Image (cartoon, rainbow, N blue to C red):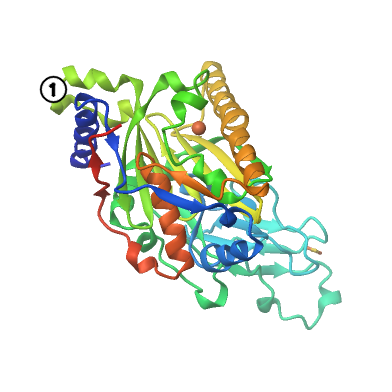
């Protein structure tokens, strides 16, 4: 992140800390009708107008750093294979053999020259084209050029890889344009093409995807819900929010922040005191911290069901036993906290919604990222995303209250 941008955020944070414990706030409260968290019609509209129209973050460039590196995953009910080709380009395909439908690759891996289907060993190049069927005679007359792995639109920008399920309506998209200049600037400075996956956890819950996503949209709860786990690490009563169009940046403040009051401004370093929570529409939160990145992707699987993909990345893989133990502990704390605390609240909220009360969720002005995300969802549903075109950071109105 550019130095001026870091200082601009720090000025706002320090302003809050010396100004009597204030925080960035939205102009107004927001009321979110809870029917939207269970209605099958609404769910279908969200799939059609959001998830099958917008690019979706699929992995970091570091997951597929070199030619032949690949990852597989199911998204939007489609088995996907993402691989970097010999030409350095990342491509996505349906992970579906064109003989009789088996997955041609499993899990993730490095340095593949080709994908060989486990069922009858048809093999495919990294660009998805079929090399040849086995038992050629049995398939005489088959047009080999016609039966490659079906491509899924895919684009890479600033160390992030996106796919799109828009189908024929939008065979190509521009990931840079989708992110916008401010996010491209920030992500390019982080070097995600070199990040390494430490661990990943996939969890399916009987919860609407928005309820799950909302767990990552405010710092307000940290001091209460996480009182016994991670609260001591953060100042839960202060955060900043930058409106980046469809996306947003919520900067969480670490407990060490008040050290800055005694330090000259030239020496301030944002990353020592902050966690950058990037909200990438529609369903991803990337938390960039000084020594690692957490990625949370929430994938809808039904009106009241979603899958949360939690991934922890670091700039390099641990090389010593001590470093390995450190990351294992870090991952365990993170996943435990989220599963036993945040997700437990999400379960309760969904139970309440299913039982018909409250009629609305009430989002406070002190939860600006939460309100912004819901405004974006509504705008995408209404086809009014131009209102949220990627723009330079716009701080939300700063209020003096708490
Ligand atoms: S299903 Fe892949 S080779 Fe038969
Ligand atoms: Fe939390």
Quarter of the picture containing the C terminus is: top left
Query: Which quadrant of the view contains residue 254?
Result: top left
Location of residue 221 with respect to 66 vertically, above or below: above
> Between residues 45 and 400, which one lies in front from this camera angle?
400
Residue 31 position in % (x across, y down): 45, 51
Residue 45 position in % (x across, y down): 57, 67
| Residue at 24%, 46% in the rendered image | 397
Q: Pick out the residue farthest to the right.
A: 138
| Residue at 72%, 58% in the rendered image | 104
User: Badge 1, how many Cα within 10 Å: few under 14, some, many 20+?
Assistant: few
Location of residue 352 with respect to 230 vertically, above or below: below
* Label 1 within 8 A of ligand 2 by Cβ: no
Residue 340 position in % (x across, y down): 62, 28
Does the rendering let one see residue 97?
Answer: yes
Location of residue 19 with respect to 59 vertically, above or below: above
> Between residues 261 and 174, which one lies in front from this camera angle?
261
| Residue at 22%, 42% in the rendered image | 5
Q: Pick out the residue farthest to the bottom.
A: 141
Quarter of the picture containing the N terminus is: top left
Task: Give the SS element for disc 1.
Answer: loop
Does the rendering let one see residue 69?
Answer: no
> Between residues 181 and 221, which one lies in front from this camera angle?
221
> Between residues 255 and 352, which one lies in front from this camera angle?
352
Residue 243 position in % (x across, y down): 31, 51
Which residue carries the number 1 mark? 264
| Residue at 74%, 64% in the rendered image | 97
Judge from the rendering whether residue 83 lies leftward or rightward of residue 140; answer left or right.
left
Q: How many marks?
A: 1
Judge from the rendering whether residue 303 lies leftward or rightward of residue 12; answer left or right.
right
């Amino acid at each position: 992140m550019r130095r001026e941008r870091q200082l601009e955020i720090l000025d706002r944070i320090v302003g809050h800390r010396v100004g009597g414990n204030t925080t960035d706030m939205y102009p107004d409260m927001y009321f979110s009708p809870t029917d939207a968290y269970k209605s099958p019609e609404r769910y279908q509209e969200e799939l059609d107008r959001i998830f099958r129209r917008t690019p979706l973050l699929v992995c970091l460039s570091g997951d597929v750093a070199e030619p032949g590196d690949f990852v597989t995953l199911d998204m939007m009910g489609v088995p996907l294979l993402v691989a970097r080709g010999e030409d350095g380009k990342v491509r996505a395909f349906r992970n579906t053999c064109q003989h009789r439908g088996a997955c041609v690759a499993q899990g993730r891996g490095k340095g593949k020259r080709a994908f060989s289907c486990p069922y009858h060993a048809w093999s495919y190049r990294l660009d998805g084209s079929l090399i040849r069927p086995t038992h050629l005679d049995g398939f005489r007359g088959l047009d080999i050029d016609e039966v490659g792995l079906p491509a899924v639109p895919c684009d890479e920008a600033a160390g992030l890889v996106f796919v799109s399920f828009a189908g024929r309506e939008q065979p190509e998209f521009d990931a840079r344009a989708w992110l916008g200049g401010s996010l491209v600037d920030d992500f390019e400075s982080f070097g995600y093409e070199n990040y390494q996956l430490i661990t990943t956890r996939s969890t399916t819950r009987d919860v609407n995807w928005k309820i799950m996503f909302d767990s990552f949209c405010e710092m307000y709860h940290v001091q209460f819900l996480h009182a016994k786990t991670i609260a001591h690490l953060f100042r839960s009563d202060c955060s900043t929010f930058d409106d980046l169009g469809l996306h947003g940046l919520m900067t969480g403040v670490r407990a060490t922040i008040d050290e800055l009051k005694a330090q000259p401004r030239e020496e301030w370093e944002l990353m020592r005191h902050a966690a950058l929570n990037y909200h990438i529409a529609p369903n991803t939160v990337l938390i960039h911290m000084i020594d690692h990145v957490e990625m949370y992707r929430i994938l809808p699987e039904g009106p009241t069901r979603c899958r949360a993909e939690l991934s922890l990345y670091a700039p390099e893989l641990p090389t010593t036993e001590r470093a390995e133990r450190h990351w294992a502990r870090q991952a365990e704390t993170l996943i435990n906290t989220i599963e036993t605390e945040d997700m437990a609240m999400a379960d309760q909220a969904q139970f309440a919604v299913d039982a018909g009360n409250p009629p609305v969720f009430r989002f406070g002005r002190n939860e600006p990222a939460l309100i912004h995300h819901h405004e974006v969802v509504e705008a995408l549903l209404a086809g009014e995303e131009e209102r949220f075109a990627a723009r330079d950071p716009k701080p939300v109105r700063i209020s003096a209250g708490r």
